[in-house]
């Protein structure tokens, strides 16, 4: 059975259960949503440990502070590698199993951070990226087969709320542990978290992964073949609307990626905050992102205007980032907390609506491939954003200039969606 045939069957199941009455081996949608939230939260928690630990890692390895941007870009490159070739893996082993394996890869990457070796830091970044890569296409595969159609964007957004929830845990747990034990021991302790999560979702794995195709090809030659690696991008390029949506997602990711990668480093090195206070600011941004993602998903479902919701979010993110240009050591903790809290909504809450819109606009039967392709384009932003931000800071020694450029890119993302808003029905 081909991959497209499998996805066609999944699409049929999704349509049959659109009213939330069930029809899959897992009754309803609560158990699949709970499993995806737990997996999403843990992968996000692991991915946020590096930017939270960045000031300590840079001192331990002797790397300059802008290196955190390059590490973030390398991690995203690892995610992009999976997105470009990993759809057959999801098809063969199922979304839950793929997410479980990715999580264990991330845990191993976190354990490598304790070595204080700059060479292993780069390997750890790639492993963290590979582990995070399955979250979008595998999560979409699960939710599209179980989510009621009338609440689909909200459910996607609730699942994506696991990302800032993981960020909150990283921003609070890691500084807390570092204050009480050697940071290497703290990292090794947190590297065991994926094992607990893998065990927790194992009871629902067989039911959720029942639609997998054990005969799907997953040989290295096939996975890395040009045809397989180009397929997601080809399907994401199937319509002008999907192209614009993917391009806008790239701009959204540049804004979100730079805030996540550099907020703690900026607060510690340029503002003079201690790591615990900076981690608390980071946690505030992540916490409001939980509320923001659910809010945007609810608004999108209530209005039926997902594209407009994304455009307003991009414009608001541009304004928020521009406000950060004027920040400095004279700002109070409360001022930084307020702005970071706003950024959690305006800069970091677009993901669920974006994924739901991609799924809605995907060619029939090709949702997984289109999601992987659009996410791949989006992840280009997570690569070039932090890397470009770090390069601008290194060349100009100006965080204000770097934040100003990011604000302009967020504005461009809003502009990219305007033609689609004109064509959309009122």
Image: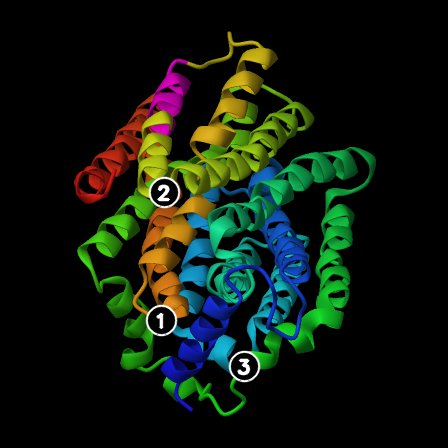
Please identify the dominant SS of the magenta region. Answer: helix
Query: Which residue is the extreme one toward the right?
Result: 180
Which is more toward the observer, 121 or 300?
A: 300
Residue at coordinates 75% horizontally, 54% vertically from top-left? Answer: 188
Query: Mark 3, mark 2: which one is toward the viewer?
Result: 2
Q: Is residue 203 visible?
A: yes
How does the figure colour the protein chain or chains? rainbow
Relative height, residue 46 to residue 416 (above, below):
below
Tell me, yes or no, whether the two marked residues, 1 and 3, touch with CB atoms within 8 Å. no
Sequence-first tag of 3 and 2: 3
Label 2 vs 1, first from the N-terminus = 2
Q: Residue at x 76, y 34 (%)?
A: 176
Q: Where residue 78 sits in the image (x, y, percent)?
A: 45, 62
Q: 314 or 82: nearer the eye?
A: 314
Please give the residue where the numbered disc 2 appears in the rendered image.
306
Q: Which residue is mark 1?
A: 366
Residue that appears at 23% across and 49% down: 244
Secondary structure under tag 2 reads helix
- Can residue 65 be spotted in the picture? no
Is-magenta flag for residue 77?
Answer: no
* Quadrant in which residue 222 is drawn: bottom left
Q: Which residues are magenta?
A: 317-326
Spot occupied by residue 301 in the image (x, y as percentages of width and height): 45, 42
The numbered mark at residue 212 is 3
Q: Position of residue 318 (x, y in %)?
A: 33, 27
Find residue 110 and report its image quarter. bottom right
Residue placed most toward the observer, 300 or 318: 300
Q: Is residue 318 magenta?
A: yes
Element type at marker 1?
loop
């Amino acid at each position: 059975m081909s991959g497209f045939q499998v996805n066609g069957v999944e699409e049929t199941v999704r349509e049959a259960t659109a009213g939330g009455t069930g029809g899959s081996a897992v009754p309803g949608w609560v158990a699949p949503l709970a499993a995806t939230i737990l997996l999403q939260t843990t992968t996000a928690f692991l991915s946020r440990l590096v930017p939270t630990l960045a000031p300590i890692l840079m001192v331990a390895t002797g790397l300059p502070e802008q290196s955190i941007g390059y590490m973030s870009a390398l991690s995203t490159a690892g995610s992009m590698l999976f997105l470009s070739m990993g759809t057959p893996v999801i098809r063969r082993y199922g979304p839950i199993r793929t997410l479980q394996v990715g999580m264990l890869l991330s845990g191993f990457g976190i354990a490598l951070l304790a070595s204080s070796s700059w060479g292993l830091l780069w390997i750890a970044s790639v492993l963290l990226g590979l582990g995070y890569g399955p979250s979008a296409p595998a999560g979409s595969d699960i939710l599209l087969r179980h989510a009621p159609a009338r609440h689909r964007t909200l459910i996607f957004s609730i699942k994506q709320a696991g990302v800032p929830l993981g960020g909150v845990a990283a921003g609070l747990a890691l500084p807390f542990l570092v204050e009480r034990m050697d940071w290497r021991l703290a990292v090794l302790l947190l590297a065991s978290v994926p094992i607990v999560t893998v065990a927790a979702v194992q009871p629902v794995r067989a039911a959720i992964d029942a639609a997998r195709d054990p005969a799907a090809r997953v040989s290295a030659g096939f996975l890395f073949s040009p045809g397989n690696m180009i397929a997601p991008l080809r399907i994401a390029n199937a319509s002008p609307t999907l192209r614009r949506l993917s391009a806008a997602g790239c701009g959204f990711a540049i804004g979100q990626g730079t805030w996540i990668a550099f907020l703690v480093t900026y607060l510690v090195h340029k503002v003079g905050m201690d790591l615990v206070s900076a981690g608390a600011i980071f946690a505030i941004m992540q916490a409001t992102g939980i509320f923001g993602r659910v809010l945007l998903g609810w608004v999108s479902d209530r209005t039926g205007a997902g594209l407009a919701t994304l455009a307003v979010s991009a414009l608001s993110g541009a304004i928020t980032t521009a406000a950060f240009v004027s920040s400095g050591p004279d700002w109070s903790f409360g001022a930084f907390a307020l702005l970071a809290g706003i950024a959690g909504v305006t800069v970091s809450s677009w993901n669920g609506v974006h994924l739901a819109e991609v799924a809605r606009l995907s060619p029939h039967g090709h949702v997984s491939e289109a999601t992987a392709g659009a996410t791949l384009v989006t992840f280009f932003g997570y690569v070039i954003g932090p890397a470009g931000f770090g390069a601008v800071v290194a060349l100009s020694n100006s965080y204000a200039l770097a934040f100003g450029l990011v604000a302009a890119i967020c504005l461009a993302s809003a502009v990219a969606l305007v033609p689609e808003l004109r064509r959309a029905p009122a």
